[in-house]
Amino acid sequence: MTDEVEAVQQVGTAAVAMTPKGLRLVIAALMLGMLLAALDQTIVSTALPTIVGDLGGGAHLAWVVVAYLLASTVSTPLWGKLGDLYGRKRLFQLAIVIFLVGSALCGLSRTMSQLISFRAIQGLGGGGLMIGAQSIIGDIVPPRDRGRYAGYFGATFGSATVIGPLIGGILTEHASWRWIFYVNLPIGIAALIVTAIVLPSRSTHVEHTIDYLGVATLTVGATSIVLFASLGGVNYAWGSPFMIALAAIGVIFTVVFVAVERRATEPVLPPRLFSIRVFSAASAISFVVGFAMFGAMTYLPVFLQYVRGVSPTLSGLWLLPMMVGLFGASITAGQLISRGTGYRRFPIAGTALMVVGLALLSTVGIATSTPLLFGFMFVFGVGLGLVMQILIVAVQNAVPFRDLGTATAGANFFRSIGGSFGTAVFGAIFANELASRLPQGTNGSVTHLTPAQIHSLPPAAVQHLLEAMTQSIQFVFRCAIPVAVVAFGLSFLLPEIELRESIGTRQPEGAAASEVLTDP
C-alpha cells in the first residue's frame, strides 16, 4: 500500500474507505498519543529536585516515577483486551481523557501525596495510549505495509525517552515544573479531536464476559513484581520483610493468574497466545531487551552528568546520537519490511548491535573523546531501533485478529516488566560496585551528592570519585552484555511468517476460524 492508495477496512458489515489524507491524520494523532505516554515516563526526572523543594516529601520522591510506571505497566494487558472486546477507538479516546485529567491534576497538586496519586491516574491513561496507538495501526494498515508506520512509532518512543529529560529541564527552568504536565493538554486535545473525526467506530455490539478475576489477580501480581523491582535496593533492603512479602505475593498471584486464565471464558491474557511461536519468542525477546535497554540507558545520563559535568537539562541533548541511530534504524527497517524484506533479520541484527554497543560503552572512561562516545551511543541506538517495533509487527501478523490488541499489549507488558527488573538489578550492581571502590563509610554520602557538589570538592577527591564512578558504570555495561547476548540468541527463535497484505483475514498458527476485522 502507498500513500496514494486508499486504506480500506471493514467495520461491522460495511466497508469503510479511508483516504490517504485521513490515514495520515490518524497516524499523526496516534503518534501524538504515543509521544505523550512515552514522554511522561522520563520528563519528570530533571524536575524532581524542584518538585521536592516546592511540595516537600522528599522521602517519597521515587513514587513520583514509580506510580506512573506501575499504573501504565499493570493496565497494559487490560487496555489491550478491552480494545479487542469493545472497540479500540472508544478505548483510545478514554485513555486520552484519563491521561489529560491526570496531567491537569498533577499540575494542580499541592502535596507530594496528591502528585503521586495523580501520577497513577496519568499512568493508567498512558498505558491505554501506548497500546491503543499500536493496536489501531493493526486495524487500518495491513502487516505488509505496517512496517513503515511501526518504524515511525519506534522512533517516536525512542525519541521521547531521550528528549524527555531535556524538555522537563527546560520547562522547569524557564516556566514551572507544573508545565511538564500542562504541556500535555493541547497535544492530547488535538489527538482526541482528530481521532474523533477521522477514525471509524464499531458499528455492531456484541455481549462479552469480562474476566474480572483474571484482571484482579494480574493487577496484584504485576503490581507486586513492579514494586519489588522498582523499590528493592533503593527504598528498601532486598532482604527486608516488606520486599520478601512483595516477592511472595507476586509469585503466588502470578501462579493463581495462570490457573484462572486457563478456565476463563474470555481471558485477559489468553494462554493460547503462548502456543503461537512468534508471540512466545517476541515476548521473551521483549523482556530481555527491556532488561538490557532500560537498565543500561539509566547510566548514560549518570556518566554524562557526574563524569563529564553536563547539566541535567543538557544531558538529554548529549544523547542525541543514540536517538538519531534509533530513529534512522527504526524507519529504515520499517521501509524495507514494507518493500518485502523479511522481518526476522532485523531483531537478529539489532540484538547483535546491542551487544557491540554495550561492549563499546563498557570501555568509555574519563579520557574518552566526545566523538568516540557519540559513535558508541549511535551503535547502541541503531541496535534498539532494529528490534522494538519490528517485534510488534511480527506479533500482530501472527495472532488471530480477535487477539490483536491483547497480543500487542502482551509484548509491551513483558518489555516493561523486563525494564523494571533491569533497572533494579543494574542499580544494585552499580551501588555495590561503587561501594567497593570507595573508602568504607563514604558511599552513602557520595550517592546523595549532586554533580555540581562533587565537582566543587578538592581536585584529588573529585578525581578519585569520578574514577570510582566511571569504573562502576563500565562494570554495569559489562554486566549488560551477557543479557544482550541472551536476546541475540532468542532472536533466532523468532519464526519468519510472510506478512499478509490484507487486514484481519490470515489464519495464524493453529487458528480455528477466520478472523474478520470488526472495528478499528
Image (cartoon, helix red, strand yellow):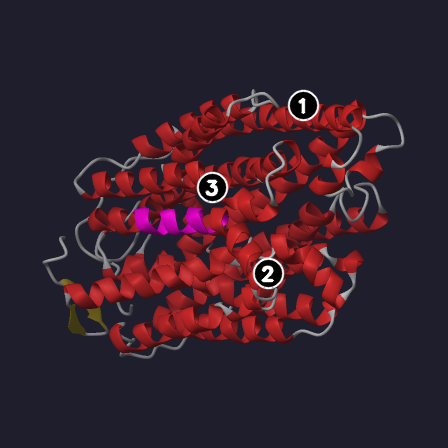
Q: Which residue is mark 3?
A: 286
Residue that extends furthest to the right in the rendered view of this protein: 441
Q: Quadrant of residue 176?
A: bottom right
Q: Which residues are magenta?
A: 151-161
**Whole-percent x and y of residue 117?**
67, 69
Residue 146 magenta-highlighted:
no
| Residue occupying the point 44% across, 41% down | 320
Question: Which mark sits nearer the N-terminus, 3 or 2?
Answer: 2
Q: Which residue is mark 2?
A: 172
Q: Is residue 87 visible?
A: no
Res 199 label: none
Which of labels 3 and 1 is toward the front? 1
Mark 3–mark 1 contact, CB under 8 Å? Answer: no
Q: How many marks?
A: 3
Q: Amino acid at mark 1?
A: Gln
Q: Which residue is mark 1?
A: 471
**Whole-percent x and y of residue 360?**
50, 22
Alpha-carbon distance for marks 3 and 1?
28 Å
Mark 1–mark 2 contact, CB under 8 Å? Answer: no
